Amino acid sequence: MKYLEDRIRDEGKILPGDVLKVGHFVNQQIDIKLLAEMARELHRLYARDGVTKILTIEASGIALAAAVALDMQVPLVFAKKGTSANVAGEVYTAKVYSYTHNRTYDVIVPKEYLKAEDRVLIVDDFLAQGNALCGLIEIIHASGASIAGCGIIIEKGFQPGGKLLRERGIRVESLAIIESMNGETGEITFRT
């Protein structure tokens, strides 16, 4: 999506550790028009895949996941990072290491929300190392459901996550794939 790439190039900030801050329009202050366009594009890409549920992980992926679920007219499920009082009963769980937060989370989905007959599309804001997506895939496998694929806003193509998932036979559709980022110059290049 050229418009998304232009916004990343113009407004994205490269922080130490290859962190890309896009909080002005993607995941803290959300450009709703852009959100709607991204949701429509992911819906178009997966329209023929029999998706019955959208799955994401809290918190930054929820906005896009909700918009995609609305476009596809299917329920949205999100994995919580850790236990809470409102999650009771049997759960699927996976450990997910976050490089951004430098910690490991137990991500949890109640078993009642994912069934073997579901066909699940994972939606998230970023794909870098692939840890969050691998955790969600582990949960989907534990439920017996099938995976339609992964829909991502921004993939850091210079990090291994996308390659690892594709090598596992997982379909990954990223709306923008960054080939390189230069923290000194602020230059961001995209895969064509």
Image (cartoon, helix red, strand yellow):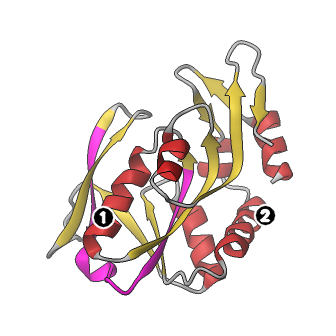
The correct choice, above or below, for 117 with respect to 152 in the image is below
Please give the range of residues in magenta: 104-125
Indicate the secondary structure of the residue bearing disc 1: helix
- The amino acid beneath tag 2 is Lys
Examine the structure image and report whether residue 120 is included in the region drawn in magenta: yes
The residue indicated by pointer 1 is 139
Q: Nearer the viewer, residue 45 or 13?
A: 45
Chief secondary structure of the magenta span?
Answer: strand
Indicate the secondary structure of the residue bearing disc 2: helix
Quadrant (top left/top right/bottom left/bottom right) for the N terminus: bottom right
Left or right of 61: which side holds 104?
left
* Residue 125, percent from left and from top: 57, 52
Residue lying at 68% horizontally and 74% vertically, measured from the top left: 43
Examine the structure image and report whether residue 90 is included in the region drawn in magenta: no
- The amino acid beneath tag 1 is Ile
Q: How far apart are the alpha carbons under marks 1 and 2?
A: 32 Å
